[in-house]
Image (cartoon, rainbow, N blue to C red):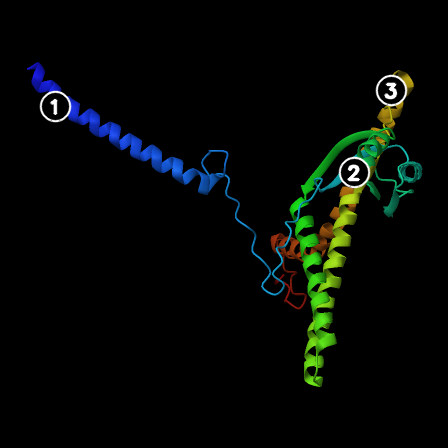
Amino acid sequence: MRSTLVRTILPLAVACALLGGCSSAGATSSEPAAGGADGRAGVQNVQVPAEADSKTGAVPESPITGTQQVVRTAAMNVVVADPAASAVKLRSIATVHDGVITSENVMSNAKSAYSTSTVVMSVPADQLDAALTDIAAIGDVTLRTIQSADVTAKVADIDARVKTMRESIARMQDLLTRAGSVAEIAQVESELTRRQSDLESLLAQQKALAQRVAQSPITVTLSKEPIVVDPEPEPTGFLAGLSTGWKALKVFTVGLLTLVGAMLPFLAFIAIIGAPIVWLVRRRRTPPTPATEDSSATPPAA
């Protein structure tokens, strides 16, 4: 039994040893070609080159933005006693933080407590938090919101497109100097004009986006503080009761006269219609008078 196990297991062990040696030899021979002299797997270290430009053969650089580009906007609702005076304070706050007032709609003589005034200022992005703190000091803040939008990818995309467009314009200008016929010159100039127009549009977008990142607008809504009047205490005593009774009498008299005035047209209409009817009814109920004796009748015989 033991000899049988030895004859069965020994060939399998030898075969496994031979296979392991072959595989390790193959891996050792392939590592220098794939991963270099460090002896590690080369699949992880292989870098795929970027696609080269079809015209110049140069490999474009990847647009890398050093810092994160964030657009921040803020809004505040503040309850104040005098919107006009508060608007003056907001101008001072904008000046202190190197900002400007971009829009102002102040209702200084508004009598309603629900009327609002709006002031929009623009301050540098790094001054936004300090400006909000100063604005909160002019009244009671009922609402404060800050919105942020990450535009890093958009900035990098526009920067890359601007760079590519400038390189394309430089190539077109080089082609223009080497153009021979009038037709070639006209074609190159037309293409050059189109690309310069696209470049100006990209530069305008780049400038607007940079302005949005550099400046943060703040919309401040000023609500007038409602005026609270304490109610006067109700009078008491004999004079107060007399005054209350006199007011009640006046109210009753006015109500009665109003009712009579409202009924007069109906009474007149009833009188006009009912008078003939009453006269006819009374005439029918009156008994007829006895007939008088005929004066021409012959007297009785003596």
Question: Considering only order in the chain, which callout, 2 or 1, is on the residue closer to the N terminus?
Answer: 1
In this view, 123 is above or below 80:
below
Residue 8's mark?
1
Res 18 quadrant in image: top left
Q: Is residue 97 left or right of residue 169?
A: right
Residue 74 appearing in the image: yes
Q: Secondary structure at mark 1?
A: helix
Foreground mark, 1 or 3? Answer: 1
Q: Crowdedness of circle 2 by 10 Å Cα count: few (<14), some, many (20+)? A: few
In this view, 20 is above or below 272:
above
Name which residue lies at 63% across and 58% down. Answer: 58
- Front one among 156 and 117: 156
In this view, 47 is above or below 298:
above
Residue 43 appearing in the image: no
Q: Secondary structure at mark 2?
A: helix
**Distance of label 1 from label 2 (alpha carbons):** 126 Å
Res 27 quadrant in image: top left
Name which residue lies at 74% across and 54% down. Answer: 206
Q: Crowdedness of circle 1 by 10 Å Cα count: few (<14), some, many (20+)? A: few
Residue 233's mark?
3
Q: Crowdedness of circle 3 by 10 Å Cα count: few (<14), some, many (20+)? A: few
